[in-house]
Amino acid sequence: MKSEKTFESALNELEGIVKDLESGNIMLEDAMNKYTVAMNLVKFCQDKLDAATTSVNKILSDNKTLEPFNVGEDNEDESK
């Protein structure tokens, strides 16, 4: 079963590609391929950030107030 890529895993992969490209020890064709992968990762990360921003803005507009936004176990306890 293939798990969905996370923002954090994509960002880590992107950082690795940047280091490879900055090293200068990479063949041109490999550099071009890595650049293409990097641009896809940037788009993926931007889409995730946009979705998170939309979610937070919806929470803020629904509540009409600025409230703490808890992630993780706290939210699981509230749903029980």
Image: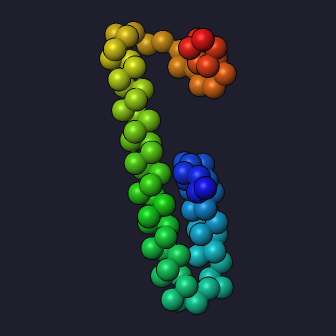
User: Of 78 and 25, which appears nearest the observer?
Assistant: 78
Q: Is residue 58 left or right of residue 36?
A: left
Point out the residue furthest to the front here.
Answer: 1
User: Of 15 and 72, which appears nearest the observer?
Assistant: 72
Residue at left offset 48%, top offset 74%: 35
User: Of 60 and 22, which appears nearest the observer?
Assistant: 60
Residue 9 screen position, x and y as percent: 61, 53
Residue at left offset 58%, top offset 57%: 2
On screen, 28 above or below 37? below
Residue 52 screen position, x and y as percent: 44, 35
Structure colour scheme: rainbow
Q: Is residue 22 visible?
A: no
Q: Is residue 63 visible?
A: yes
Residue at left offset 48%, top offset 82%: 32
User: Of 78 and 18, which appears nearest the observer?
Assistant: 78
On screen, 25 above or below 50? below
| Quarter occupied by residue 21 | bottom right
Quarter of the image for the C terminus: give it.
top right
On screen, 36 above or below 26? above
Residue 56 screen position, x and y as percent: 42, 26
Q: Is residue 31 left or right of residue 55?
A: right
Residue 3 screen position, x and y as percent: 59, 52
Q: How many labels, in total? A: 0
Quarter of the image for the N terminus: give it.
bottom right
